[in-house]
Amino acid sequence: MTHISELIAEARNGARRFPRCSTEQALVYSCERVASRHVPLRELTRRDVESIVEDICLVEDIDIPFIQFARRTGRCTAWADRTTHTIGFLRRNPLLDDVIHEISHLVSCFDGHDEVFRSTLVRLGRRHAGVEWASLLHHLYVGVGLEQAGW
C-alpha cells in the first residue's frame, strides 16, 4: 500500500500536466486523477450516466440536468454549464467521478474549483462513489494545501 505522503507528492507533481489551468484548478484535477487511479471508479454507459445522474439528483434534491454526449476534441472529458443546467460528457464511457464532478459544478455557487466546489465533490463522492474514494480525495486536497471543509 502506498503511503499518503507519496500520493500527495504524486498529486503535486501531476498538477504540471495542466499548464493552462490556475494552480487551484490544476491541483484539483491532479488530486482527482490520483484518487481515481488508486481507488478506481467504474466506467459508465450512456444509460448508466442517465440513471446515476437521476438517482443522485433525486437523493440530493437537485433538479435533474440536461445531459449531452459528444466526441472528445481535446483534453476536456466533461463539462457543466450552470446557466443552462446542462452537463456534458466527451468520452465514450464516462467515469463515475466525472459524473460527480460535473454535478458538483451545478450545485456549487461558483463556476471554478473553489473550496465550496471541493467540499461538494467530496460530500457527493462520499455518498455516491464510496467513502474510500472520497476520503482519499479529501486528504489529497488537504495535503496539497487546498482549503477543505472538515471530513
Image (spheres, rainbow, N blue to C red):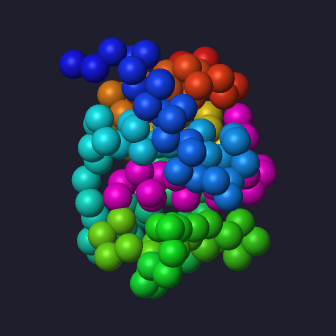
- Residue shown at 47% from the left, 52% from the top: 100
Q: Report the magenta stretch's main SS.
A: helix
Q: Is residue 104 magenta?
A: yes
Q: Position of residue 92 (x, y in %)?
A: 32, 76
Q: Position of residue 72 (x, y in %)?
A: 45, 79
State the residue in front, 96 or 25.
Answer: 25
- Residue shown at 55% from the left, 20% from the top: 143
- Residue shown at 67% from the left, 70% from the top: 81
Quarter placement of the C terminus: top right
Q: How many numbered circles does the render carry? A: 0
State the residue in front, 124 or 60.
Answer: 124
Which range is magenta? 95-116
- Residue shown at 65% from the left, 23% from the top: 145
Q: Is residue 28 visible?
A: no
Q: Position of residue 94 (x, y in %)?
A: 36, 65
Where is residue 129, by image quadrant?
A: top left
Q: Is residue 137 left or right of residue 131?
A: right
